[in-house]
Image (tube, helix red, strand yellow):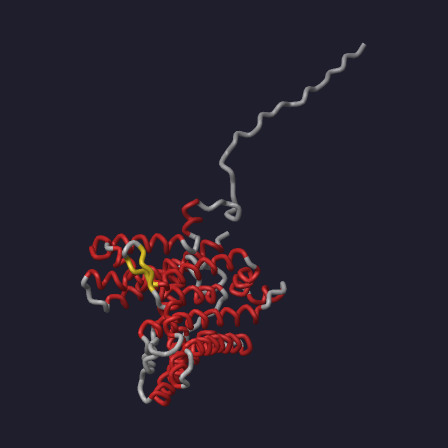
Amino acid sequence: MSMTQHAEPAVTSPPAPGPKETDGRTAERPLVVRLLARPEVGVFLGAVAVYVFFLVAAPPVRDASSMANILYQSSTLGIVTIPVALLMIGGEFDLSAGVGVITSALTAAMISYQLTMNVWVGVIAALVVSLAIGFFNGWMVVKTGLPSFLVTLGTFLILQGVNLAVTKLVTGNVATDDISNMDGFDQARKVFASSFDIGGVQVKITVFWWLLFAALATWVLLRTKYGNWTFAVGGNKESARAVGVPVAFTKISLFMLVGFGAWFVGMHQLFTFNTVQSGEGVGIELIYISGAVIGGCLLTGGYGSAIGPVFGAFMFGMVQQGIVYAGWNPDWFKAFLGVMLLGAVLINLWVQRTMTRR
């Protein structure tokens, strides 16, 4: 009788748990880093810091009427900064926006006054001209492949010369004639340059238009196909074209949106001051671009928001008026512009590297 032995399987204990290995690609970034990578967060914190600083340094800022003036100054910058930001998300620049504001105002004023027509005829004609300038810029960029920096720099110089030359030719002066007594002026002023009493404080209508345009632009970017197209052409236009995105239409329409913003602010200036100086507008385009960059729009395109530039414009308005309320030399505003632009570029570089880190 033989005996059979059965070997029992060896029981091995599971290895002690150790630290989870990651290769860097699947590691989750800290919450703070993810928040700071949002295009709006950095500029929001900066805007809060600037606001608190001037609350302490310039006591008049604490007054409600002073804040209304700051918001007004911010709105006149922000209305154009928003479409400039959308254009930058689409991967392009527009250096002609500043003089484009004056071109639209000059067009409306001269057509209305010299042709003795209702001012709304001049307003509509100015809108057509502004949209045509935007179309020209976009068409040139798309058809020639030239950098938008060069194309819009050329447009900037053309408009600067045309504004001065045509105004002198038509009016015999460097400024347009006063249109405040013309038909339709009061109605147009209500739309573009009126004020509302809120708690005893006069608030300009441009503040409401500014916030409305920001909300609309945010909805377009985040909830519509056109918003997806904007991000796509800014990120990689060839890849966007390969998946059916109408690259030419998107880029040209973005330039035309900048033209619309320039037209709106031009109408505000015209119906606020009743006349326009033809040599103005030079240099303001840099503030529009700076506001978009500080608002989180990458210089390389494909990234940004419409809310960030709102805070960017507010920072400029806050500093521009805050320096005055503090009794400082207003020339410091230009120094602030340079410092903030350089800082925004460095922050954008960090954001870009954070997004692409694997």
Q: Along the horizontal axis of the image, is 229 left or right of 182?
A: right
Res 173 visible: yes
Q: Residue furthest top?
A: 1
Give percent across and percent down for residue 214.
43, 60
Q: Along the horizontal axis of the image, is 266 left or right of 257?
A: left
Between 175 and 77, which is closer to the camera in this rendering? 175
Q: Residue furthest left?
A: 327
- Compared to 270, does 348 lie above or below? above
The image quadrant that residue 311 belongs to is: bottom left
The residue located at (50%, 62%) in the rendering is 302
Give percent across and percent down for residue 72.
32, 63
- Is the N terminus in the top left, top right, bottom left or bottom right quadrant? top right
The residue located at (79%, 12%) in the rendering is 2
The residue located at (47%, 59%) in the rendering is 216
Between 222 and 182, which is closer to the camera in this rendering? 182
Give percent across and percent down for residue 118.
42, 79
Give percent across and percent down for residue 42.
38, 54
Between 6 and 128, which is closer to the camera in this rendering? 128
Between 134 and 16, which is closer to the camera in this rendering? 134
- Compared to 304, does 133 lie above or below? below
Q: Along the horizontal axis of the image, is 324 left or right of 37?
A: left
Res 151 visible: no
The image quadrant that residue 242 belongs to is: bottom right
**Number of on-image labels:** 0
The residue located at (57%, 69%) in the rendering is 247
Q: Residue furthest right?
A: 1
- Compared to 345, does 183 lie above or below? below
